[in-house]
Image (cartoon, helix red, strand yellow):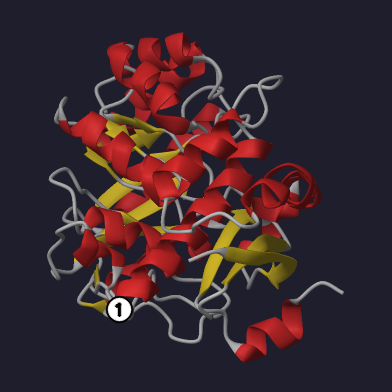
Amino acid sequence: MKITAIQLSTLNVPAPPPRNTYYPHNTYVIARIRTDEGIEGLGYTMLVGGDGASSVRAYLQDNLVPRLIGEDPLQISKLWQKMYDSDRGIRKKGIPMYALSAIDIGLWDVLGKSVGRPLWQLWGGAADGLPVYGGGGFLSYTVADLVKEAEATFAIGSRHYKMKVGLPDTIEDAKRVAALRKAIGDSAKLLVDANQRLDVHTNVRLAKLIEPYDIFWYEEPVYADNIAQCAEVARRINIPVATGENEYTRYGFRDLVESKAAAILNPDIMRCGGFSELLRISHLAAAYDIRIAPHLAPELSVHVLASIPNALLLEWSISRTPIWREEPALDNGCMRVPHRPGHGMEFSEAALAKYLAK
Ligand SMILES: [Mg+2]
């Protein structure tokens, strides 16, 4: 099989309320991999708020696509390395890894479709459902918004809900956590996410204030670039630290693991290096009994979590804009693995008609 063309496009998907109080839209950069056997793979990555989307697309167009035309799309490991090695003048984080991830996702889709199997099955996975947690809970939400979103999450059978922390006023942060815990009761699992907003001391102070509210994990306390500080927070607080949505490749996750910076890892398949690298990162973490709760893209990550020994949770958004031809299937708080060949996802005609950038 040969790659004959890779068609790039951009999809700007508006965020629904109350999520749009935090960012107005997300942007998907799409890479459709066409082959001489008529099989087409759908690759994509997603930029939160759309920042950097045009740069990712330019990197794909200028650096990756020309190197892939004429190659065999089934030789994914070889092509991953070819893309990774293609530019030795920049570090493999950020823009280039978003771009590489989109291609890797599309290549695996071609491979799955070529043998008529879903990806989780190619990796020896089980067809059990994977539990989801409700992401959201932005700082722009009122406490009433938090309660409403959390209750909507529990209504689909999930037991886990995540809210943001990191307000300038730490006491106010802790009050919001206390108010939500009071509203949802003791049995629900409550997660918090600082989105790199706080310094070490403020994290330690906040963690101490909210520890009585039984917090399931404490996410991304400090700048993702400062692994030593993340490890310091992890040592000093009594809540498990989760991080990794802004980390890239097995090398970045090796550093997190070796530094004891996190008890739980949150790799993002659309950034960290696609299916190939999420599998490698998961296997690396499994040797340390560290569990994997991928950031976003549950429709893709579900294939990996179904295939690894250290799966924890998938991230799901209750308030979201439907964009898929077949939306991911949820059953009592668990996402069912798709049985369609490849990764099994395709954007709906309606979403493409409405949101495709001109
Ligand atoms: Mg996060």
Q: Residue furthest right?
A: 358
Splitting the image into 4 quarters, where does residue 210 fall?
top left
x and y percentages locating residue 166 in the rendered image: 55, 33
Task: Give neighbour class at mark 1: few <14, some 14-19, many 20+ (Cα, 10 Å).
Answer: few
Splitting the image into 4 quarters, where does residue 249 fall?
top left
x and y percentages locating residue 40 in the rendered image: 53, 75
Q: Is residue 228 above or below residue 185?
A: above
Residue shown at 65%/83% (left/top)?
351
- Between residue 63 and residue 212, name the one nearer to us: 63
Report helix, strand or loop for mark 1: loop
Kindly tell me whether residue 332 is visible in this rendering. Answer: yes
**Amino acid carrying mark 1 in the image:** Gly
Q: Is residue 94 above or below residue 315?
A: above
Kindly tell me whether residue 272 is visible in this rendering. Answer: no
x and y percentages locating residue 12 in the rendered image: 73, 68
x and y percentages locating residue 53 in the rendered image: 74, 52
Residue shown at 64%/52% (left/top)?
48
Q: Which residue is mark 1?
A: 116
Left or right: 207, with 1 as reference point: left
- Between residue 57 and residue 225, name the one nearer to us: 57
- Between residue 268 and residue 40, name the one nearer to us: 40
Q: Is residue 91 above or below residue 147?
A: above
- Between residue 257 and residue 150, name the one nearer to us: 257
Residue shown at 36%/57% (left/top)?
301
Count of numbered labels shown in the rendering = 1
Q: Considering the image in quadrants, where does the C terminus appear?
A: bottom right
Residue shown at 34%/77% (left/top)?
341
Left or right: 183, with 141 as reference point: left
